[in-house]
Amino acid sequence: MVNPWLDSDMRIDPLEERYVEVRARTERLAAPLSVEDQLVQSMPDTSPTKWHRAHTTWFFAEFVLGADGTSGRVWDRPEYRFLFNSYYDAVGARHPRPDRGLVTRPALAEVAEYRAHVDKAMLDVFGGPSNGALDVVELGTHHEEQHQELLLIDIKHVLAMNPAVGPAYADIVVAPSADPGPLGWVEVSGGLVEVGRTATVGGDFMFDNEGPAHEVRVYDVALADRLVTAGEWLAFIDDGGYRRPELWKSDGWYRALEEGWSAPLYWRRNPDDPSNWWIHTLTGIRPLDPHEPVVHVSHFEADAYATWAGARLPTEFEWEHAARDIPVRGCCLDEQDPGFTYHPTAAGPSTVGSGSGGSGSGGSGCGGLRQIYGDCWEWTSSAYQPYPGFRPAEGAIGEYNGKFMSGQQVLRGGGALTPPGHVRATYRNFFHPHTRWHLAGVRLARDAEAHR
Amino acid sequence: MVNPWLDSDMRIDPLEERYVEVRARTERLAAPLSVEDQLVQSMPDTSPTKWHRAHTTWFFAEFVLGADGTSGRVWDRPEYRFLFNSYYDAVGARHPRPDRGLVTRPALAEVAEYRAHVDKAMLDVFGGPSNGALDVVELGTHHEEQHQELLLIDIKHVLAMNPAVGPAYADIVVAPSADPGPLGWVEVSGGLVEVGRTATVGGDFMFDNEGPAHEVRVYDVALADRLVTAGEWLAFIDDGGYRRPELWKSDGWYRALEEGWSAPLYWRRNPDDPSNWWIHTLTGIRPLDPHEPVVHVSHFEADAYATWAGARLPTEFEWEHAARDIPVRGCCLDEQDPGFTYHPTAAGPSTVGSGSGGSGSGGSGCGGLRQIYGDCWEWTSSAYQPYPGFRPAEGAIGEYNGKFMSGQQVLRGGGALTPPGHVRATYRNFFHPHTRWHLAGVRLARDAEAHR
Amino acid sequence: MVNPWLDSDMRIDPLEERYVEVRARTERLAAPLSVEDQLVQSMPDTSPTKWHRAHTTWFFAEFVLGADGTSGRVWDRPEYRFLFNSYYDAVGARHPRPDRGLVTRPALAEVAEYRAHVDKAMLDVFGGPSNGALDVVELGTHHEEQHQELLLIDIKHVLAMNPAVGPAYADIVVAPSADPGPLGWVEVSGGLVEVGRTATVGGDFMFDNEGPAHEVRVYDVALADRLVTAGEWLAFIDDGGYRRPELWKSDGWYRALEEGWSAPLYWRRNPDDPSNWWIHTLTGIRPLDPHEPVVHVSHFEADAYATWAGARLPTEFEWEHAARDIPVRGCCLDEQDPGFTYHPTAAGPSTVGSGSGGSGSGGSGCGGLRQIYGDCWEWTSSAYQPYPGFRPAEGAIGEYNGKFMSGQQVLRGGGALTPPGHVRATYRNFFHPHTRWHLAGVRLARDAEAHR
Amino acid sequence: MVNPWLDSDMRIDPLEERYVEVRARTERLAAPLSVEDQLVQSMPDTSPTKWHRAHTTWFFAEFVLGADGTSGRVWDRPEYRFLFNSYYDAVGARHPRPDRGLVTRPALAEVAEYRAHVDKAMLDVFGGPSNGALDVVELGTHHEEQHQELLLIDIKHVLAMNPAVGPAYADIVVAPSADPGPLGWVEVSGGLVEVGRTATVGGDFMFDNEGPAHEVRVYDVALADRLVTAGEWLAFIDDGGYRRPELWKSDGWYRALEEGWSAPLYWRRNPDDPSNWWIHTLTGIRPLDPHEPVVHVSHFEADAYATWAGARLPTEFEWEHAARDIPVRGCCLDEQDPGFTYHPTAAGPSTVGSGSGGSGSGGSGCGGLRQIYGDCWEWTSSAYQPYPGFRPAEGAIGEYNGKFMSGQQVLRGGGALTPPGHVRATYRNFFHPHTRWHLAGVRLARDAEAHR
């Protein structure tokens, strides 16, 4: 990829190339959306596309270009610092989150100028003397990748709130999937295993919440060899899954009652035939495909499903231990492929036998685990907590991860809307257990025989 | 004015001319606003400009073009009936009011097409055989005038929520006003007087809530000869008006506490000099002018102020009786005047002496009452209730006024954002007593001497 | 009745006699209730029996015994002024209304001592020199009568919230009623009529909100000759009355949806036979009697019913004008009668023909109007507003009525729980239009022929 | 202790003795409270004393006496099953938790009869053939001990809501404490350690959430040698602890803003001298003692304090590993000691040096750790989650612990209101992180040197 602001094709360093690519992808993702689509905030948890585009830019303006206290000089509209700060309390007051959809001024066109202006100013950073700022630049690109995924799940929610029938982000016709076959189990041997990573100078990028590397005692476990499907979830619904409190955690049961849950978010019964389900996706409304993974379920629903199925959710360490040696491949964001569906796809054919006697081997190996990376994020049973020895960075950047380590649940593995190369075995995503608008699904786990 | 859709300058009838003028004004009022400005709903009480433009058009599509049950053929997007119905329950389900700001699709450009399309189809109505539909057309133009005022007070609220400093609807520099002088009083003789009007065939337009004409017993009263000013309101604030429950109605006191009122809506203390007040207006933020009428106060505040001032609010019949013979002139909407300020203006010089011994005469005459029409709507002490013999029209049109006759308070006289020719002595506006975003102010009243 | 605190049977003046009787009735009404029953507050609108007993006592302690600023010496627990003030903001801070059920200390026994102590101290007032305090004593007795009715409707709500089956305040078996026959209409001639009363020295007691006497223009009207019955209300329910927005005022419709109304408060369908209704009363749960008046409906429901029935509610002046010459007799509180049912009773036989051709005559006469006084309060179409020339009293007592003149609706006529002698033609009761826990029902009105 | 229902002093088995003792303690704890005190529910989280007394009895009636499906025969009031079920959804519908304070009937006296009746019926269980029921009896006694602590923290909240000055549960004058000296640190060596217990036949009682025993990898850690004191907390307040978002977890910060926290629950500034603090306790309101442990803080506050202090909270496994070999002794519930203060007491003299160089030894030993058991529960950094291999029991009893394993935080060590003998090293208490009405305080932890 070529930097469009450079006059010649002089070599650019890998970070600059990465910067240019990431910034360009954000613009590509916003391109199909109208000025109006990009303005709306459909609930407090979501943010407008316009805000995502401005906020990711503000990150570089504030923490890279303005790191020397000159952020005011980067762009002569002081209110940008107030409007497009997300949650960095150390930076100062910020605009109330639920009001992000009221910001008609600056206009979207001005935000586009802001992006271009900051991108231009960033050239000097790459051209300048190497210093600590480049670490922040790298962080900023990973940060922007996270917002690319948020942009897509947020606009999905916005379009779902639009009462006109079937608004689609992308006009793609999605073909029915092949049956992935019955669920199989892969046994993973436990022990005292290492998880997480410790940051090293010159090492690959990692978020602070992935470290330090440390040991945990993991017990033998069997993991399902694929994600739970929509068809399997229908059996849960038909068996009264949403009406049986004994399957649910207490907090989850009350939340389900309060919000009237009776199916995953975005599922709708056909009013003319209630046995028939439709699903709202980024490619519009279409019949539910029983073979695709269930997605847009809360942690509470995932946990209740697992209980109903005689299983449980894996811990984040069971997951990481099993995934560690599996190559990071899978269905992830590929907006330049015209056939890309913006949705998880059905698992391919099984490579292990079905039933609990699966022959997979754990630790190094784990052959047979399908859909570990991509398709959808997998809820784990682990609360999001700091690792032993975790220290947030100093200053505002230190607010990045640490302050959310309360009340949230870890998800692993990435999904169909995760930018390519963004996820890895140690990557920890997190959401509150009641949330459903992000791309989360379910992999089952069971204690291994010896332990049962 | 010439109908732009006609090929020649053939004569058009007055109703058609009125239709064309009203429709054109709506477009002029929306013109300064960006696509984004027109989308936003800043609170449940307000509606987006886009919605106002579509809804006023839907009124003609539904009740005129579609009166024979063919509304579906007028415009081939069935969701418009769902999206742009305001509160006509007889028409069918409608979009939840607080979600009007989420409608990114149809786009604003499509709504503009819808307006043009319906305007074109309306030509046939005017050219066709005269029938009852023309009454509904006339109603529709007055309905649209009401939405013109709503459009302006709603966008004022939207811009006030925008955190950037000083967004203005119109770039006008407003000059300070001259002192209107001390408040005078005009005595109005009572008796058994006629109020309201009874609809007649071929008579001037009236809303159903203005009739039937009937008698009420009005007592002698003294009315203030002008509106309460911002400067007078400051004295109320400084005297603890917002902290003294004995001045307030019970419901008002609790609402004031709950919402933290300490000044009219849109007033802000200068953070560097708390004795100094600023005001958000449609021409941006500027210093408060002590001579301009106070506006954006709730009925509760108006009533508390009147109690503090040793007075009370007038009843709607006292007001109407005093106003009956006063020509309808005053500061009203004039968006084609480049110097128009979109705000009430200070009263001109007094024509009566000050103090309670004012020499005005009531009933026919009432000389000396300034600002009766225009500037701002005047809260009355009258609850909005049906007149004796009131009957709502049959069908959905019957929902126009009658169903709001509970819990609301009558306002009289029109304001600076009311389209010219819209208001009259019998005109009854109504809002809930806690509302503040519309252009309401205060005229005081006192029982006449004999009655005290 | 003999004053129990007097050693001999020396003559006592009528006000003292009245004081003693009223105070004794409060104690009789509380007697069937346990210590626990008397403590509970079942919703913010209601108050505990214990609180009613203390608050009515505090009224005399504060405004009579403590009128000279010595209220602190009456009872040496200063927190009583804070706990048992209802809404007299001029007296000082008071306990938050919704927390009245948390006051376990002082204990009920101490409140009983407080009552006895204040009653004893009041003897000196009666024995002392006649002065203005006696007016306040008289007001205090009428005030306590109002709280007697509140005590009963509040404990009814408390017992209805108790999940055990059928808790009754009084163990009475209620016999089915006779059919009152079809609804008849009584025409009442209008004109310029006098309503209200003006207070005179030595005159009968009146509340300030009943005056001054003044003229209003009333039009000819036909009033239903009895209250709407439970059986007639069932027809409204069966005809979809609670599901048809066109019958409702807008505020009412949204309140009904929000609170899920589908029948009057305290009505329950028999789970085994949904066509069969039961009703919770002060004598326990029993089958609904179709001939008894419907009661515990909000103003919104009453208004919707009237619209459904092709009628409307009367104004408070139509009601007062028709009732003026009717003797004050009817079903009211009679707790010393062992057969008293604490509930409205069916109308007796009609004395006018049915249909709109009723032969009653208005103004002086109105023969044929049944149930004008007693049974249940009748919602009127009139908002509660001050009469021309109304002035609240000075000081805290002035808060008695005036500050509630916003957002409430007038009811007339008294009910089965109103103490005998309490009500009269000019008496104005008032509640917010959504309230249902008090004893309110419906009398229909129609414009007279000439006016229709 | 002698069973009062037995005619002779024949030997009773230890479980029966335990049953009799536990049941008697509940009655002793309720004895100082009036009928009114025992009825009130001051917020949804708390329950009335009356409810605690009935619910703990219902537990035996339902799960022991009625285990054969005959619970209806135990007590002939079927509504008891509805009213006094806490959260066992498998048993059937139950009374809404926030309405527990409305249950005036059954009366408290009837609940006392119910207790006596069930206690009598339980004699047959003890006399009968040994069977599985005895396990449930044992569980029931531990369950009742938990409710004894809840009864006390709930009535503390009830009394705090009472507006009268200074209501006390017990009339005790509390003497000021001696200074416990500066905080010291005790290093605890980590490793692969065993935590939890596995239930064994005939073994000591344990709750299901304490098992199974399993290994965890614990790192070297330094634990504070005593609890944080009220005086130390004052320094946190004075340093802006409640106003500095950088010290707080994100969820905690918003909760603190929403609820307006500026000090621990039950602390009040002296209005006449804001530097002076008072505290509401079960012995009434008294000056805050700077040497007593801070208590009634949420997990969010505990965590913010630790961050401010340059430390963190311990994990539940660090705590358990350090506590394992420490004898269970400390300030716990002792209602029969007339000098018992119902409040945590200041730590005794330190046995280690101050500063981070403390010389304590970890694992087996941990000499120098004061206040490990008793005084107050200690918030840990661990989310409440199931141990590897955890299985809830079958049936309603299985709802005891497992369904709360979401969104809650583990506390360890017991407190001043915990019945003697109730707590142990493996005992896991849990509350939502925002809760403050229970007796929770703070012990700090720091990573050991090598790890830092």
Image (cartoon, coloured by chain):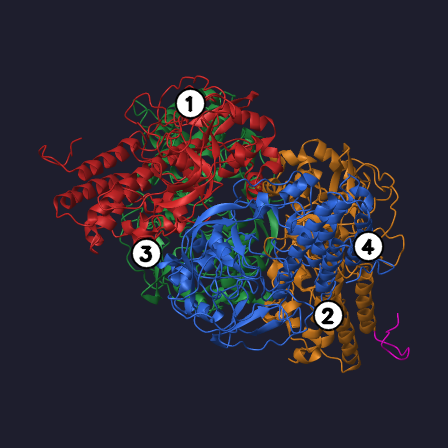
Chain colours: A orange, B blue, C red, D green
Callouts 2 and 4 close, C-beta under 8 Å: no
| Chain letter for the residue marked with disc 4 in the picture | A
Magenta highlight on residue A7: yes
> Where, by quadrant of the figure, is residue C283 drawn?
top left
Question: Which badge, 2 or 4, comes first in the chain's sequence?
Answer: 2
**Pointer 4 residue:** A332
Q: Residues within 10 Å of mark 4 (few under 14, many from 20)?
A: many
* Secondary structure of the residue carrying numbered label 4: loop
Callouts 3 and 1 close, C-beta under 8 Å: no
**Pointer 2 residue:** A57
In front of the other: label 3 or label 1?
Answer: 1
* Secondary structure of the residue carrying numbered label 2: helix
Which three-letter amino acid code belongs to the residue tagged 2?
Thr
Q: Are marks 3 and 4 on the same chain?
A: no
Callouts 1 and 4 close, C-beta under 8 Å: no
Where does the magenta region start and end? A1-13
Callouts 3 and 4 close, C-beta under 8 Å: no
| Chain letter for the residue marked with disc 2 in the picture | A
**Pointer 3 residue:** C90
